[in-house]
C-alpha cells in the first residue's frame, strides 16, 4: 500500500519513491533492532534499568513497611493516649469527695464484715481448742494410770537393785578405808620431805631477799647521785641560759645604740647634703646676678651704639621719608577709597546677613512650631494608644468574666453529670454489698449524703 500510494503521488519520481521506500524499510529494520535489543537482558541499559527497577522496588517495599510501622505506631500511641486519658479521668473521678467518702464507707463495711468473720473464726478456734484440750486430757489420764503402773514396777526393781548395791558399797567402803589409810601414811612421809625442802627454800629466799635489798639500796644511791649530777648540769644550763639572755640583751642594746648612731649619722649627712645644696643654690644665684649685671651693661652699651647708629641713619631716613610721603599720600587716598567701598560692601553684607538671620529665625520658629505640633500629635497618638489599651484590657476582663461565668455553668453541668454517675456507681456498689451480705448502713449513708452546693460567682461587684 505504501508503494502504491507512493507511486500515485504527484511531483515525485520513481527514484525518489524508491529512496523513500528504502528509508522506511531501514527505519522499520532499525525499530525492530531497537525493540529486540531492548529485550536483551545483558546490555548495559538493561542492567542499569534492572538495577533502578530493583532499587525502586526495594525502596517501595521499605517505604510500605515504614508506613505500616508508622501506622501501627500511630495506632499504638492513639491507644496509649486513650488509655492514659481514660485512666486520668478515672483517677480524677476517684479523687472526688463523694467517691472518697463512698470508698471509705465501703472500706468501713469491709472492715465490719472482716470483724464479724474474725469473731466467728475466734469462736470456732476456741471450740476447737476446747475439743483438743478434752482429747489431750483423756490421753493424759490414760498416761497417768500407765505411769503409776510402771512406777510401781520400777520401785520394786529399784529396791532389789538397792539391796545389791548396798552390799557392793560395804565391800567398796572397806577397800576404800584401807586404801585411804595407806594414802595418809604416804602423804605424811611426803609432807615431812616437803617441810624440809620448804625450810631450805625459805633460807634461800631470805638470802635472795637480802641480796635484792642490797641491790635496791645501791640502785637508789646511784639514782640519787645521778639526780644530783643532773641538778648540777641543769643549774649550769640555767646559768648558761641567763648568760646568753644577758648577752642577747646587751647585743640588742648595742644594736639599738648602733641604730640610733646610724640615724644620727644619716641626719648629719642629710643636713650636710642640704647645706651643700643650699650653697650650690646661693652660688648659682650669685652667678645669675653677675650674669644679669653683665647683661645689663652689655645691653646699655648696645643701646648706646644703636642710638648712635640710629642718629646716623635718621638723616637718610628723612630723605627716604620725604620720598615716601607722596607715595603714602597716594596709598592713603587709595585706601580711603577702598575703605569706602569696603564699608558699602560691609553694609550690603550686613543687610544680607540680617536678612539671612531673619529667614533663619523664621525657619527656627517654624521648626519649633512643627516640633510642638508633632509633640502634640505624638501625645495625642500615645493617649489614643493608651485609651485603646485600656479598652482592650476592659474587653479582656469582660471576656474573662464571661468565660468564668461560662466555666461556672459548665462546672455545674459537669457536677450534675458526676452526681448522676456517682449515684449509678454507688447504687451498684450498694447492691453488690447487699448480695455479699455486708453491713450496708454506712454505704447507704455515703450514697444519700448531701454535698455542699457552691454558687457561681455573680456579675455585681460589692
Image (spheres, rainbow, N blue to C red):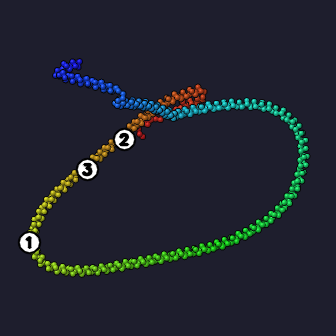
Which numbered circle lies on residue 152?
A: none
Residue visible at 32% across and 43% down in the picture: 385
Classify residue 142 by image quadrant: top right
Disc 2 versus disc 1: distance between alpha carbons? 95 Å
Residue visible at 64% across and 71% down in the picture: 234
Disc 2 to disc 1: CB gap under 8 Å: no
Which SS class for mark 1? helix
Which dot, 2 or 1, sits closer to the camera? Answer: 1
Q: Name the N-terminal-most of marks 2 and 1.
A: 1
Residue visible at 15% across and 57% down in the picture: 352
Look at mark 1 in the image and give the residue it sits on: 326
* Residue 256 pos. (x, y %): 50, 75
182 or 142: nearer the viewer: 182
Q: Name the N-terminal-most of marks 2 and 3.
A: 3
215 or 234: nearer the viewer: 215
459 or 418: nearer the viewer: 418
* Residue 319 pos. (x, y %): 10, 76
- 224 lies above or below 194: below
Tell me if I can see residue 138 in this picture: yes
- 265 lies above or below 82: below
Quadrant location of the N terminus in the rendered image = top left
Taking the image as shown, residue 419 lies to the left or right of residue 274, namely: right
* Residue 375 pos. (x, y %): 27, 49
Label 1 packing within 10 angstroms: few (<14), some (14-19), many (20+): few
Which numbered circle lies on residue 371?
A: 3
* Residue 119 pos. (x, y %): 66, 31
Q: Name the N-terminal-most of marks 1 and 3.
A: 1
Label 3 packing within 10 angstroms: few (<14), some (14-19), many (20+): few
Which numbered circle lies on residue 393?
A: 2
- 401 lies above or below 375: above
Which SS class for mark 3? helix
Amino acid at each position: 500500500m505504501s508503494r502504491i500510494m507512493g507511486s500515485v503521488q504527484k511531483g515525485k519520481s520513481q527514484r525518489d519513491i524508491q529512496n523513500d521506500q528504502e528509508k522506511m524499510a531501514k527505519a522499520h529494520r532499525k525499530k525492530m533492532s531497537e525493540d529486540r535489543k531492548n529485550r536483551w537482558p545483558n546490555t548495559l541499559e538493561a542492567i542499569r534499568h534492572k538495577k533502578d527497577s530493583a532499587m525502586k522496588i526495594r525502596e517501595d517495599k521499605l517505604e510500605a513497611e515504614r508506613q505500616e510501622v508508622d501506622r501501627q505506631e500511630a495506632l499504638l500511641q492513639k491507644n496509649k493516649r486513650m488509655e492514659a486519658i481514660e485512666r486520668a479521668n478515672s483517677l480524677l473521678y476517684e479523687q472526688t469527695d463523694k467517691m472518697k467518702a463512698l470508698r471509705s464507707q465501703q472500706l468501713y463495711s469491709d472492715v465490719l464484715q472482716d470483724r464479724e468473720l474474725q469473731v466467728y473464726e475466734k469462736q470456732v478456734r476456741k471450740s476447737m481448742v476446747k475439743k483438743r484440750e478434752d482429747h489431750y486430757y483423756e490421753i493424759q489420764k490414760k498416761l497417768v494410770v500407765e505411769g503409776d503402773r510402771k512406777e510401781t514396777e520400777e520401785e520394786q526393781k529399784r529396791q532389789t537393785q538397792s539391796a545389791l548395791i548396798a552390799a557392793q558399797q560395804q565391800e567398796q567402803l572397806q577397800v576404800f578405808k584401807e586404801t585411804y589409810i595407806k594414802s595418809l601414811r604416804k602423804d605424811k612421809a611426803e609432807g615431812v620431805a616437803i617441810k624440809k625442802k620448804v625450810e631450805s627454800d625459805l633460807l634461800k629466799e631470805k638470802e635472795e631477799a637480802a641480796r635484792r635489798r642490797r641491790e635496791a639500796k645501791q640502785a637508789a644511791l646511784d639514782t640519787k647521785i645521778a639526780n644530783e649530777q643532773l641538778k648540777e648540769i641543769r643549774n649550769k644550763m640555767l646559768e648558761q641560759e641567763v648568760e646568753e639572755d644577758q648577752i642577747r640583751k646587751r647585743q640588742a642594746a648595742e644594736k639599738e645604740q648602733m641604730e640610733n648612731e646610724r640615724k644620727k649619722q644619716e641626719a648629719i649627712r642629710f643636713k650636710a647634703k642640704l647645706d651643700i645644696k643650699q650653697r650650690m643654690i646661693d652660688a648659682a644665684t650669685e652667678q645669675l646676678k653677675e650674669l644679669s649685671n653683665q647683661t645689663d651693661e652689655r645691653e646699655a652699651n648696645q643701646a648706646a651704639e644703636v642710638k648712635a647708629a640710629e642718629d646716623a641713619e635718621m638723616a637718610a631716613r628723612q630723605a627716604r621719608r620725604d620720598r615716601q610721603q607722596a607715595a603714602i599720600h597716594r596709598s592713603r587716598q587709595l585706601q580711603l577709597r577702598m575703605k569706602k567701598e569696603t564699608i558699602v560692601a560691609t553694609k550690603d553684607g550686613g543687610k544680607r546677613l540680617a536678612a539671612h538671620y531673619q529667614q533663619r529665625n523664621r525657619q527656627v520658629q517654624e521648626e519649633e512650631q512643627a516640633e510642638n505640633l508633632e509633640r502634640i500629635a505624638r501625645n495625642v497618638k500615645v493617649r489614643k494608644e493608651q485609651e485603646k489599651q485600656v479598652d482592650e484590657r476592659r474587653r479582656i476582663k469582660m471576656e474573662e468574666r464571661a468565660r468564668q461565668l461560662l466555666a461556672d455553668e459548665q462546672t455545674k453541668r459537669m457536677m450534675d453529670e458526676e452526681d448522676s454517675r456517682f449515684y449509678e456507681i454507688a447504687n451498684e456498689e450498694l447492691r453488690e454489698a447487699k448480695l455479699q451480705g455486708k453491713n450496708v448502713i454506712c454505704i447507704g449513708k455515703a450514697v444519700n449524703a448531701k454535698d455542699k452546693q457552691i454558687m457561681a460567682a455573680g456579675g455585681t461587684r460589692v
